[in-house]
Amino acid sequence: MANLKEIRDRRESIASTRQITSAMKMVAAAKLKKAQNAILQLRPYAEKLQQILGNISGSLKDDEENLYAQNRDEESVLLVLITSNRGLCGAFNSNAIKAAIHAALETYSEQMMAGQVHFMAIGKKGFDFLKRHGYNVLFNGSELLDDLTFERSMKLSEMIMKLYVEAEYDHVDIVYNQFKNAGTQVLITEQFLPIKMEELGEESTSQVNPYYIFEPTKEYILKEMIPRSLKLQFYKSILDSCASEHGARMTAMHKATDNATEILKDLALEYNKARQAAITNEIIEIVSGAEALRS
């Protein structure tokens, strides 16, 4: 059994740690509220935009008419990995990293062997892992998370779209954690480019409105809206990841605080036992000394 000083030192250390994790939990909860509101407000708009695209996509199913739906041979692949800049959020970052590496090694194994799989890292944790293990990282967008706005994310999405149109990459996937609730994040590997116009049409075939009036033409509207939809989809993925990060951190800090409380209870019991044992030993020594003096 540890002595009283060791137990006291450990109790003070754990109590200090519990105070820190409790504060981090409250900070994460406050940030989660803001991030959750942002993604929940954006989703209806994004879904409605997708529905409208589906309603009018029939005339642009030909790949040649749409620069962002060219189904080329997948010789080169870009994987956009979205993680966080900070840790202490459970398995949030490791799960996303594992999914991206699995996609590179399994789904795009041939391109990987040919050195034609590149990564774009949004989040310091993902970037550090990829660089440390020697993967090809095209760009580090970690600074975007320090001040996330649609305008800043749009610059990255435009860069990706330009690389695809110029045939630098034939396929682009986004790997991120989709926000479901504070305690649940769904790992998503989502095709960003090329877009699947036929799926848009299939999803909303039953909702086609024959009374739509298009000005100037639906072809022009589609060509204007598809890039906007892609930029919005990219921004939504980052917002989802940010909300998921705060939810995962709040959950992790809540569990850490609860674990620290349980350890403190166990240490209090151990401290009392050690103190009682020390008092008993002192009494025995006093009695033994008194008996020795009598004799």
Image (cartoon, rainbow, N blue to C red):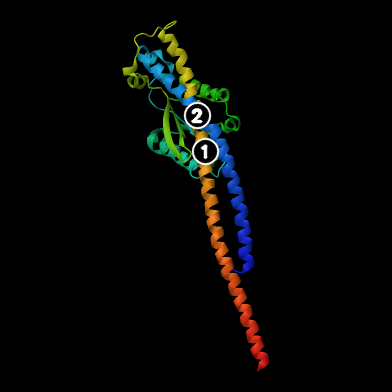
Q: Is mark 2 on a helix, strand or loop?
A: helix
Lower position in the chain sequence, tag 1 or tag 2: 2
27 or 73: nearer the viewer: 27
Horizontal and vertical percent position of residue 40: 48, 29
Horizontal and vertical percent position of residue 28: 56, 40
Q: Which residue is drawn at 56% across and 44% down?
A: 25
What residue sits right under mark 1 in the picture? 245
Judge whether 106 appears above or below 52 on screen: below
* Image-quadrant location for residue 47: top left
Q: In this view, does 40 lie to the left or right of 19?
A: left
Visible in this render: residue 238?
Answer: no
133 or 155: nearer the viewer: 155
- Residue 39: which disc? 2
CA neighbours of label 1 inside 10 A, class few (<14), some (14 to 19), many (20+): many
Q: Measure the C-alpha gap from mark 1 to mark 2.
A: 13 Å
Q: If the image is split into quadrants, where does the C terminus sit? A: bottom right
Visible in this render: residue 211?
Answer: yes
Q: What element carries label 1?
A: helix
Horizontal and vertical percent position of residue 60: 37, 13
Horizontal and vertical percent position of residue 44: 45, 24
- Is the residue under label 2 in contact with that under label 1 (CB below 8 Å)? no
